[in-house]
Image (spheres, grey):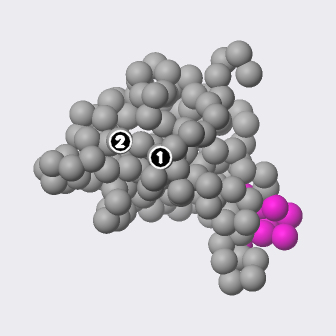
Amino acid sequence: MTASFLVELKDWGLHVRLQGTLSLEQRDTIARQVERHCATLGARGTSWSSLVEFDRFEAEGFRPEIVVALMKLARRCGQLRCGVVMTDWHWAAAMAEVMIAAGIDDQARIFVLAEDPQADGGLAGEIGGRPAADHYGMDSAMAWVLNGGLVPMVSKAA
């Protein structure tokens, strides 16, 4: 799998997609883009949401302090909800710890999706013309990002 990333503004907020093994330089570029977009969204003066997708993500030298700082910044800039979609329980546990450390576990939810072998693994591929992830839980993650509501949280006790 090739490494790629996407950081884009949407009318509802911020969409970030991280795929594959990203270098330290790529991750620094992503962090700067997220900072700029948070400032832009904060300047609107309205609350917003974000969707972050980790597709077979790997990061040697993971720096949780950078993620904590970005999550705190997003909250200060008006982020209301953050949905994090991933296919790996190891990263989900690491991300849950980061959310707790950042103090945003009240506004963020992690959605761990089963990998679909028909979709070349991860969140990639299509089934019936729709992204494969739509068939395996992405719809519920996006619905929560846009509308909120009750979604069970993963806790340390689980």
Direction top: furthest residue: 157
* In the depicted structure, whether residue 132 falls above or below residue 79: below
Q: Quadrant of the N terminus?
A: bottom right
The secondary structure that dominates the magenta segment is loop
Distance, label 1 to label 2, CA atoms, is 9 Å
Left or right relative to 34: residue 65: right
Q: Quadrant of residue 61?
A: top right
Q: Position of residue 21 (x, y in %)?
A: 60, 50
Magenta span contains residue 118: yes
Q: Secondary structure at mark 2?
A: strand
The residue that disc 1 covers is 148
Q: x, y (%) of residue 13?
A: 34, 56
**Picture coordinates of residue 96 (x, y %)?**
58, 28
Residue occupying image coordinates x 51% and y 43%: 149
User: Can residue 4 be seen by looking at this rendering?
Assistant: yes
* Residue closer to the observer: 77 or 60: 77
Seen as rendered, the residue at the extreme front is: 149
**Residue 57 is one of the magenta-drawn residues:** no
Residue placed at 53% from the left, 56% from the top?
A: 143
Kind of residue indicated by mark 1:
Gly
Q: Which residue corresponds to the image point at 60% horizontal and 39% vertical from the top-left?
A: 151
Does the residue at mark 1 contact the one at mark 2 (Cβ under 8 Å)?
yes
Indicate the secondary structure of the residue bearing disc 1.
loop
Which residue, as the protein is rendered here, is positioned at the far bottom? Answer: 129
The residue wearing badge 2 is 80
Q: Is residue 135 left or right of residue 7?
A: right
Question: Which sits in the foreground, 22 or 5?
Answer: 5
Report the amino acid beneath label 2: Leu
Left or right, residue 5 beside residue 87: left
User: Measured from the top left, where is residue 118 in percent x and y?
Assistant: 84, 70
Examine the rendered structure and indicate whether residue 60 appears above or below residue 32. above
Magenta range is 116-125
